């Protein structure tokens, strides 16, 4: 089975992308496929210098420039309807949908660049033998197994926002065809974005909500959230109480600020400051390991 890892990356995300690639390779020795980095020449630029840095990390890394024609109408509708211009910086998040096009690969794993691999993802790939679309829930529930299972067409994911997390997907089979991709784009283009953005949280373009609404009418499988554990539910006090927790978590997703700076070692949530230095330091340890092996 031919498996690829897809990332969307621009110049500002190269540092985190390199650490993700390093951590992914470290914990997934079974993976012998390509790492495909998606970019364009407008919304998501990646310089030749950035590409040369990333080539250090993987011999068979490929850089795929997006054909943006299919996204033009969707981008225009979003720009017309979205009052918060700050959202536009996340427009390239829609490029992760390239994983649904016809491909030379049997399976595609997609990971956001602000993720860190802590353990093997082989178990998730094994699930893909029976399911053509796999994701993790967009959930901060302490019970990581709560939403795990198979969801037939018409069954929404009963998380707080009914969404799958946009940071980790696996696609295969009939979920990888030009027809499927075009159907997804048409679904997104038909969205009432003025209404959509009145409901959506601040700062997001809403690609995971758009995809979740579309996938709910399909057949999909949801992994436990250990495969995409959002950083804000891994505070220092939890790791002190449960030091073995990191042996279970497969991927940490560094939302709400990045570990590249100590600025986000403390985050204010619901009126309370919480410390995240321990989980941020884990990313920094991987960064040091990576740069020691691949200095740049």
Image (cartoon, rainbow, N blue to C red):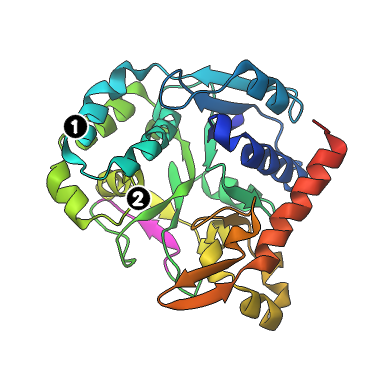
Give the quadrant of residue 90. Answer: top left
Whole-percent x and y of residue 229? 54, 61
Q: Secondary structure at mark 1?
A: helix
| Residue picked out by circle 1 | 77
Q: Residues within 10 Å of mark 1 (few under 14, many from 20)?
A: some
Few, some or many residues within 10 Å of mark 2 (<14, 14–19, 20+): few
**Residue 203 tag number:** 2
The answer to whether residue 143 is left or right of residue 61 is left
Residue 275 percent across, percent down from the top left: 60, 73
Of 84 and 229, the residue lying toward us? 84
Q: Is residue 148 visible?
A: yes
Nearer the camera: disc 1 or disc 2: 2
The numbered mark, 1 or 2, whose residue comes first in the sequence reads: 1
Task: Write down the region rendered in magenta.
Answer: 147-153
Residue 52 figure quarter:
top right
Q: Secondary structure at mark 2?
A: loop
Rendered residue at 26%/45% (across/down):
84
Q: Residue furthest front?
A: 263
Q: CA distance from mark 1 to mark 2?
A: 17 Å
Q: Position of residue 243 (x, y in %)?
A: 72, 76
**Observer-nearest of 232 and 227:** 232
- Quadrant of image for the C terminus: top right
Left or right: where does residue 140 sit relative to residue 285? left
Q: Residue furthest right?
A: 292
């Amino acid at each position: 089975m031919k498996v690829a890892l897809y990332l969307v990356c621009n110049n500002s995300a190269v540092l985190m992308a390199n650490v993700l690639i390093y951590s992914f390779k470290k914990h997934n020795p079974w993976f012998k496929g390509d790492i495909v980095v998606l970019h364009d020449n407008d919304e998501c630029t990646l310089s030749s210098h950035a590409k040369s840095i990333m080539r250090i990390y993987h011999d068979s890394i490929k850089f795929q420039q997006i054909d943006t024609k299919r996204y033009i109408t969707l981008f225009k509708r979003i720009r017309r309807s979205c009052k918060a211009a700050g959202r536009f910086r996340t427009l390239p998040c829609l490029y992760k949908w390239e994983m649904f096009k016809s491909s030379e690969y049997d399976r595609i794993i997609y990971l956001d660049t602000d993720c860190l691999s802590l353990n093997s993802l082989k178990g998730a790939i094994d699930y893909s033998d029976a399911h053509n679309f796999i994701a993790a829930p967009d959930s901060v529930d302490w019970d990581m197994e709560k939403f795990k299972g198979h969801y037939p067409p018409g069954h929404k994911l009963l998380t707080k926002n009914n969404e799958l997390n946009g940071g980790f997907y696996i696609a295969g089979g009939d979920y990888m065809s030009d027809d499927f991709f075009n159907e997804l784009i048409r679904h997104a283009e038909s969205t009432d974005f003025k209404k959509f953005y009145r409901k959506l949280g601040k700062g997001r373009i809403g690609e995971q909500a758009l995809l979740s609404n579309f996938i709910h009418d399909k057949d999909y499988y949801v992994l436990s959230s250990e495969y995409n554990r959002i950083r804000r539910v891994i505070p220092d006090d939890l790791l002190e109480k449960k030091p073995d927790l990191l042996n279970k978590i497969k991927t940490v997703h560094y939302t709400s600020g990045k570990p590249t700076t100590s600025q986000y070692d403390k985050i204010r949530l619901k009126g309370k400051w919480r410390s995240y230095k321990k989980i941020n330091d884990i990313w920094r340890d991987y960064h040091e390991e990576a740069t020691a092996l691949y200095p740049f």
